[in-house]
Image (cartoon, rainbow, N blue to C red):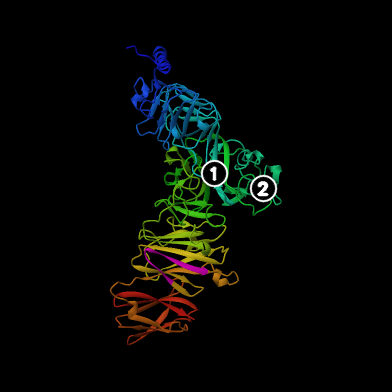
Amino acid sequence: MMRTFTFKKQFLLFTLLMGCLYGNAQNVWTGAVDSKWNTPGNWLPMAIPTQTTDVVIPAGLTNYPVIMGFDGIADCANITIDAGANVIADNNGNGKLRIYGSLTINGTLDVTDGTLIMAGNIPQVIPANSFLNNTIRNLTIYHIGVLGSTTIQGPLNLTGILKLNGGPLNTGDFLTLKSTAESTAVIDEVTGVLSAITGNVTVERYIPGKRAFRLITPSTTGGTINSNWQEGGSEAAGFGTDITGAGGSSNGFDPTTTNNPSLFTHTNSNATWAAVTNTTLGVLTAGTPYRLLVRGDRTVNLGSNTSPATATTLRTTGTLVTGNVTVTDFGMMAGDFSMVGNPYQAAVDMGAVLADATNLNTDFYYVWDPTLNARGGYTTVIIATNSNTIPGSQANRYLQPNQAVFVQTEASFLPTSLTFTEAHKFVFSNVTPNLYSEAADAAEAHIRLAMYNSDAADGVAMDGLLVRFNDAYSNAADNKDALKPTNQDEGVGVLNNGQTFSVESRQMPVAADVLTLINTSYRGTSYTYKISVSELDNVTAYLQDTYTGTSTELANNAETLYNFNVDPAVEASIAQNRFNIIFAETLGTNESVNAAFSVYPNPASGNEFKVQLASAENPMVTVFNQMGQQITCKTNMEGNILTVIPGAQMATGIYMVQVQNAGKTAVKKLIVK
């Protein structure tokens, strides 16, 4: 019987014949089995394409390739997608199309959720309008020989990860690294001797809608502040921000009635802020840190401080930084805070950066978190535990692209430097516009205190502190303690040797130890402390409120809430040192030492008081004030009653009476009226 051929089959055979006569082997997609690229039965001839196979995707079929990555990478030499045909690379970037030759796209190539790999040992191009919406998720440049290169010939948006692992990429000034509320495009560690990126790149950074300062840095070099963050003065909805300053429009600023500055640099040598004086002069440079008030996009009404903030996307255009970047601008004195910016369009591991630095504290760095409080606040990142001092803040050891932070000088008058390297990059996915993940509590014994507005005690804390305990630490202030940066609004820290700390590292506490808390800048009247105590098994901690005269036990391995009010007209209520945390010995489970003695009268008059003991076995009484200072006293013993006589009249307040008797120690509170 005579076999007949359809026109479509004749065309496929003709295409195969031409491929055999004039170059690479050629496979034509039929989709006869399913949509999997690496299924032989989907091709004519029935073989999976390789790097030396040209592929043609014709129109008029039922099944078209959907590359998911489950059965490997989809390889080809040259790819032609006819009008009406389509190829999809999908699955969160796992679907990968690797091309060793050219792209001829007359149909649809959808890589919005996939990965394109350019791998040829020839100059390759990415033609204009090759992709659905001119957008791809991931792009990898991995040329296998010295002749390989990639050039972009038309607008291309990248939403995920750009990898440069072999050979150069010429952007043709067409590449944009996108940023949205969900993700921001990044550039992975650049490897390979010939890997490089030339041409301008536009980098976006999405900023959520909140009027607050940001510590920010560009990751491109080129153009002015005005042409970048101010969109050249245009009123672009959803982009840029208004930047104000002295001289108004004559100096490139957006004019207001006051022309108050909203953009600052930090002079690290003397720890002062300097307002930027002009936004049309000079070049915006990758890694240069700024403090920028972001009010919203360019449409926000500058005539009103109550104008609602809008989300915006800041854009910069210029050349990207790759390779080592060294910073030497630091304060010279021990403890000096210096602002540095991330020069890369990728997160970096600050633990690794600081470990490789010279004369910088390797335990902490300081993040301005705009989500805190009304206008933002500082949180201290503890490198070793990848945690921070404020519950709800997502700051951790991974510094975002476009983010600036503060680091601390270790010792005075020594050479200080920091070098960012490609190996410091930390890219496991394209990052979110805030920070990676909420920090966890430290594993060691600790007290974490978070301060909230009482009306919003379930939200992000206004400020916080961490006291961690280990006998390897010292109670003296040293580089294991993190100084407390000053906030615009409420702040809380721990006092030690006249300095306030956000992280205090101390030896394990003992009975009668006292931590003095420092509170600053009350803006409201009603607050809540959430205090978590962990692994303090041998002592009991109490929060002491010197204004109300109360002490509240802080349960171990639990969270205690303490509500309090302040009155600006009452000095004692807003005293910075109103609160202390004091420690008493924890009682055993089978006996109550406290029950074995009592203190009376309580409240006492201040000239003497008595301690009634169940039995007296060489008892000793020690009295401490709220600052942890021992009060000089004399004692007289009559039977089981000790009369305690202070050396001087005791002032009104709360005291801790520590009794040691029969080899046991306990503490009770004494109120002096």
* Spatial CA span between label 1 and label 2: 23 Å
| Helix, strand or loop under label 1 | strand
Q: Quadrant of residue 78?
A: top left
Query: Which disc is residue 177 wearing?
Result: none
Q: Are marks 1 and 2 in contact (CB under 8 Å)?
A: no
User: Is residue 371 left or right of 7 when viewed as pictured?
Assistant: right
Query: Which disc is residue 245 wearing?
Result: 2
The N terminus lies in quadrant: top left
Q: Position of residue 434 (x, y in %)?
A: 50, 47
Mark 1 — residue?
206
User: Is residue 508 left or right of 268 when viewed as pictured?
Assistant: left
Above or below, 262 against 636 in this view is above
Q: Nearer the viewer, residue 453 or 579?
A: 453
User: Is residue 171 left or right of 669 when viewed as pictured?
Assistant: right
Q: Quadrant of residue 19?
A: top left
Q: Residue at x 33, y 74 (%)?
A: 665
Q: Residue at x 34, y 22 (%)?
A: 47
Residue 331 appearing in the image = no
Above or below, 599 against 178 in this view is below
Amino acid, disc 1: Tyr
Magenta extent: 552-564
Labels 1 and 2: the sequence-earlier one: 1
Q: Position of residue 294 (x, y in %)?
A: 59, 48
Q: Which one is closest to the eye, mark 1 or mark 2?
A: 1
Local packing at callout 1 (Cα closer than 10 Å; few below 14, some 14-19, many 20+) is: many
Predominant SS along the magenta part: strand
- Residue 554 included in the magenta stretch of the image: yes
| Helix, strand or loop under label 2 | loop
Q: Quadrant of residue 115?
A: top left
